[in-house]
């Protein structure tokens, strides 16, 4: 057995679960204000008069409000001039004021009132005719706005929102680095406590508790644990599994730190790998390395995806999404959402830019047998890319140190 796999008792792991000491600095008010100014510049560039951001990750991005979406409208209206306008139910105003990270005018509505009329009235005050709507807004919000503004007045704000959120600042990178470092430590401990007969449920419970103990926002943001043949299913299968000798272990998990996410996958052998295990694992490692080497500003996500696929095709896998081979894209953006722009996939011709953060996970599936996914994240630098976490060096050595 590897020195990194199955070498810890539960008590040993517990001693290594202390609150994280190297804490990243929270996003400053000046950065939130700069984001508002960038949104205004993009509004002008795209020819819209106002931007409405509804509850969700983008609301947190622009004003620090971590508010879950519901049927009650909570939103931020940004216009080219004047303070942003925060709209929320009257009974929630004290809570909203407590979490707002920027100065904003407040517009409140009572339970029997139509909140979308507040948006229309605010737009009229600011001389705004067209509204760029948060692409993550629920349809009922679009329908409510359409009822007071008309269909022609509403456009998609995807380009504006992605134009702001896709390029991370140094402060955002530091928060993501902390989240990645914490999740990698959880992976190390999870690998250390595996033994023959352990269940997927036991590992999921440990991983969530470990994230909480280290200081993640809410334990594990997600957690996939698969053994043996189940690893051939990218996002797992229902039911509990028990680990057997000489089976692959695939764990995909992450956490968030002040809203910023990690997302790391490790696949390794418990016992001795077969020749096929070893061959496919090495191909996965090579595809991940090739994708990373292809990253630099100006290169498209499509081109990086094609680079990873060419490694597999050169060894007789695929092509395209055919199996045995890679069933999904090479990667996705990450930040305040686990999946966000830019996507490393065919059809995305948008050039990568400095500050973009993406996963690199060109999974290989051998149907009915097993799958291997190695997932680490990178951020685009001035002349290439930098890893948040060092990739796995070997099938029986999931961690570089």
Image (tube, helix red, strand yellow):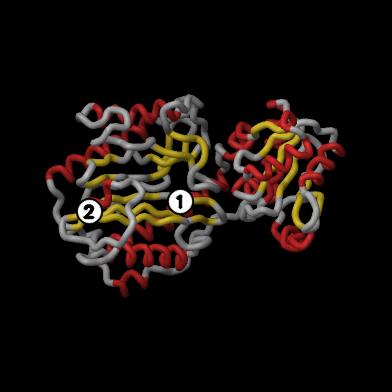
The residue furthest bottom is 11
Kindly indicate the quadrant of the structure image that contains residue 26: bottom right
Residue that mark 1 sits on: 262
Relative height, residue 129 to residue 33 (above, below): above
Residue 118 screen position, x and y as percent: 81, 46
Residue 169 horizontal side relative to residue 254, left or right = right
Check residue 278 in the rendering and tell me which mark sits there, or answer none.
none
Residue that mark 2 sits on: 228
Residue 63 horizontal side relative to residue 334, left or right = right
Residue 171 screen position, x and y as percent: 57, 47
Report the front residue among 166 and 158. Answer: 158
Residue 10 screen position, x and y as percent: 30, 72
Res 361 visible = yes
Q: Residue at x 59, y 48 (%)?
A: 57
Tag 1's secondary structure?
loop
Q: Residues within 10 Å of mark 1 (few under 14, many from 20)?
A: many
Residue 43 horizontal side relative to residue 251, left or right = right
Q: Residue at x 19, y 55 (%)?
A: 247
Report the front residue among 305 and 110. Answer: 110
Kindly indicate the quadrant of the structure image that contains residue 332: top left
Residue 277 horizontal side relative to residue 149, left or right = left
Mark 2–mark 1 CB contact (< 8 Å):
no
Residue 198 screen position, x and y as percent: 25, 66
């Amino acid at each position: 057995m590897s020195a990194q796999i199955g070498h810890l008792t539960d008590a040993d792991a517990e001693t290594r679960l202390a609150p994280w000491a190297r804490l990243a600095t929270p996003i400053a008010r000046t950065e939130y204000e700069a984001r508002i100014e960038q949104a205004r510049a993009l509004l002008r560039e795209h020819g819209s008069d106002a931007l409405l951001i509804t509850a969700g990750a983008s609301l947190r991005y622009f004003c620090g409000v971590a508010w879950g979406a519901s049927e009650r409208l909570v939103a931020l209206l940004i216009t080219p001039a004047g303070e942003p306008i925060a709209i929320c139910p009257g009974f929630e105003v004290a809570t909203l004021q407590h979490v707002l990270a920027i100065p904003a005018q407040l517009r409140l509505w009572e339970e029997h009132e139509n909140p979308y009329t507040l948006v229309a009235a605010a737009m009229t005050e600011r001389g705004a005719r067209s509204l760029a709507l948060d692409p993550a807004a629920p349809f009922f919000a679009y329908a409510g706005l359409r009822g007071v503004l008309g269909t022609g007045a509403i456009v998609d704000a995807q380009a504006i929102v992605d134009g702001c959120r896709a390029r991370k600042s140094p402060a955002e990178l530091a928060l993501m680095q902390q989240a990645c470092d914490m999740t990698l430590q959880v992976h190390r401990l999870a690998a250390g406590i595996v033994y023959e007969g352990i269940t997927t449920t036991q590992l999921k419970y440990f991983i969530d508790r470990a994230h909480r103990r280290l200081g993640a926002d809410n334990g594990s943001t997600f957690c996939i644990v698969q053994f043996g043949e189940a690893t051939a299913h990218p996002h797992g299968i229902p039911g509990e599994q028990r680990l057997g000798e000489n089976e692959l272990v695939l764990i995909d998990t992450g956490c968030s730190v002040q809203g910023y996410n990690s997302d790391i996958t490790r696949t390794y052998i418990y016992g001795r790998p077969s020749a096929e295990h070893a061959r496919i694992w090495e191909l996965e490692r090579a595809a991940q390395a090739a994708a990373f080497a292809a990253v630099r500003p100006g290169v498209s996500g499509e081109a990086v995806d094609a680079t990873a696929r060419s490694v597999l095709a050169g060894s007789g896998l695929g092509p395209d999404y055919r199996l045995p081979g890679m069933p999904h894209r090479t990667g996705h953006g990450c930040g305040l959402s686990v999946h966000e722009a830019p996507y490393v996939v065919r059809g995305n011709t948008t050039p990568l830019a400095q500050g973009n953060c993406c996963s690199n996970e060109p999974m290989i599936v051998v149907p009915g047998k097993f799958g291997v996914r190695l997932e680490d994240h990178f951020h685009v630098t001035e002349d290439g890319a930098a890893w948040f976490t060092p990739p796995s060096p070997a099938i029986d050595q999931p961690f570089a140190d």
